[in-house]
Image: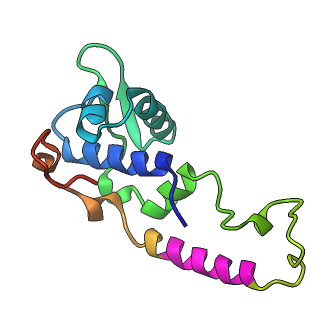
Amino acid sequence: MQLSKFTDYSLRVLLLAASNTDRNTTIRDAAEVYGISHAHLKKVVLHLSRLNYLVAERGHGGGFRLGMPADQINLGDLIRSTETDFALVECYRPNTQCRIAACCLLPAILDEALAAFMAVMDRYTLQDLHLRGDAFALGSGSQTA
């Protein structure tokens, strides 16, 4: 299983926002820190704002900040709200072309594995991932998400 870039970027944006509790973070700042397209991050910030994970403000002094305390942002819930496809193999899809789909046990095992993954993610919040603001210093080669 691989999380989508959208989910990855969502986690990164939230981590950056959590490290900047004293000010708003701009999309430009996030794009520079992570080396990610401004356009991609704009979509992520908009989505996270619609879900109240972020509060976004336009204009001078604008940017985004956490919309709720980091200890209330559950990682499992976040993943569920950003991933669009949990079909791990082709046979999960409607009208599957797999010839053994009716008798195969693999989907049940994969369902169990996915449930275990999500159960672990449900145990953690953004606060558990929290990094100090200096971890995001540009050009420092320090740890980011």
Q: Residue at x 69, y 63 (%)?
A: 87
Q: Is residue 46 left or right of residue 114?
A: left
- Quadrant position of residue 91: bottom right
Q: Residue at x 79, y 61 (%)?
A: 93
Q: Is residue 60 above or below residue 77?
A: above
Residue range in magenta is 106-119
Q: Residue at x 75, y 64 (%)?
A: 90
Q: Is residue 2 left or right of residue 144?
A: right
Q: Nearer the viewer, residue 7 or 47?
A: 7
| The C terminus sits in image quarter | bottom left
Q: Is residue 103 above or below residue 35?
A: below
Examine the structure image and report whether residue 27 is included in the region drawn in magenta: no
Q: Residue at x 56, y 57 (%)?
A: 80
Locate residue 132, reporting x and y percent. Answer: 14, 52
Q: Is residue 65 left or right of residue 53?
A: left
Locate residue 140, reporting x and y percent. Answer: 9, 45
Q: Nearer the viewer, residue 134 or 100?
A: 100
| The N terminus sits in image quarter | bottom right
Principal SS element in the magenta part?
helix
Examine the structure image and report whether residue 109 is included in the region drawn in magenta: yes
Q: Is residue 117 left or right of residue 13?
A: right
Locate residue 69, reporting x and y percent. Answer: 31, 51
Q: Nearer the viewer, residue 21 or 93?
A: 93
